[in-house]
Amino acid sequence: MLRPPIEPMLARTLPELPAPASCPGGCLLEPKFDGFRVLAFRDSRGVYLQSRAGRPLHGYFPEVVEAVAAAVPAGSVLDGELVVWAGDRTSFARLQQRLSAGGRLPGLARRHPAHVVCFDLLEHPGEVLLDRPLTYRRKALAGLLAAAPPQLALCPQTTDPDVAARWLADWVPVGVEGLLVKAAAGRYRPGRRGWGKYRYRSTTEAVVGGFTGELDTLLYGRYDHDGRLRYVGRSGPLAPAQRREIAPLLRPAVRHPWPRPLPAAWSGRLPRPEPLPYEPVEPTVVAEISHDTAYEWHRFRHGVRHVRVRADLRDVDVPRLEDGAADPGTGPAA
């Protein structure tokens, strides 16, 4: 019998989708939702929810615990993604609120209940399934969830790349980050990157507001409708050619709207972020950037990629921030 903590199986990043027959047994495609990875252990004593990092989550999501206890037989272990909806899209911020809700937790659970998009079954009564092929585990999972409430949803799956492309076109606006690629004959290997992950990326523009180190990364901003430059994200490390292109264009700022160092709550993507030292520059240089769908509270949660300088654009040509809106990207990145 499996007991927590168990390292979940992971995915490596793919630059493009593989050919359908390139995976052992064929490639199975699933939408990748923007949420918390969760393993749900159901035994005779109750339900234990485990995070990707091995930490307990069941205390923060009592409505999920209740759903699993009611619908899943003892001796089962589910793998999936925790999501919370905000209107017509998922909200990562509402997931994070649960971790610091304190006495507000019961109210949040009632107003914004969490759901689990289930995509794997590691154990069901009487059998550990780690060495079974994915097709076997998937069939068992579908049977287990046949009468489950909507809070425990079976993740869509297809072998057809055209169907998966339609998912990206239709579901990215509601919180799908991309696609997971899995081998139909694949076993479940805890802790190993045995799956593939293809992230949907869009391109858009932002204003360069500063840089870190010796022009190691760039800090980007956008103007709101009051004319304030708001921080929206940070690039990954720049390539030498990118540094040579942009360095002559940057001018030290005489006055700058952002505090120094950048507050940890603005810039941090680690579990314990720290304030970020940086050099402010005059916000006149426009950059084209590539980003994924993780955009909330006017910021890109994940690092963005610096594509190029847009010398043909002025800062006033960059899209303005819209209250409560996702980033107006221009479509899939090349």
Image (tube, helix red, strand yellow):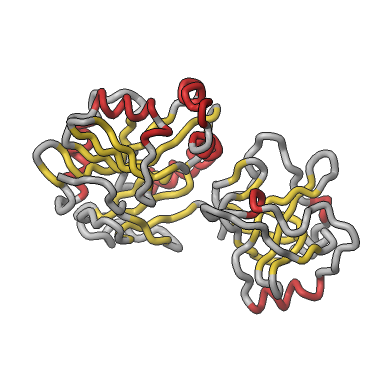
Q: Position of residue 284 (x, y in %)?
A: 83, 60
Residue at the (64%, 49%) spot, across then down: 265
- 302 with respect to 69 (left or right): right
Most extreme residue toward the right is 254
Q: Is residue 170 something that shows in the picture?
A: no
Q: Position of residue 62 (x, y in %)?
A: 38, 28
Can you say which quadrant of the picture contains the C terminus? bottom right
Residue at the (25%, 38%) spot, across then down: 41
Relative to 232, say whether 42 is above or below: above
Give residue 310's quadrant in the image. Answer: bottom right
Most extreme residue toward the front is 103
Residue at the (31%, 42%) spot, across then down: 39
Residue at the (51%, 52%) spot, across then down: 271
- 17 with respect to 202 (left or right): left
Relative to 253, say whether 74 is above or below: above
Front residue of this view, candidates 190 and 175? 190
Q: Position of residue 68 (x, y in %)?
A: 28, 29
Can you say which quadrant of the picture contains the N terminus? top left
Most extreme residue toward the left is 126
Q: Is residue 262 something that shows in the picture?
A: yes
Question: How many badges with numbers are in the image?
Answer: 0
Q: Position of residue 182 (x, y in %)?
A: 30, 53
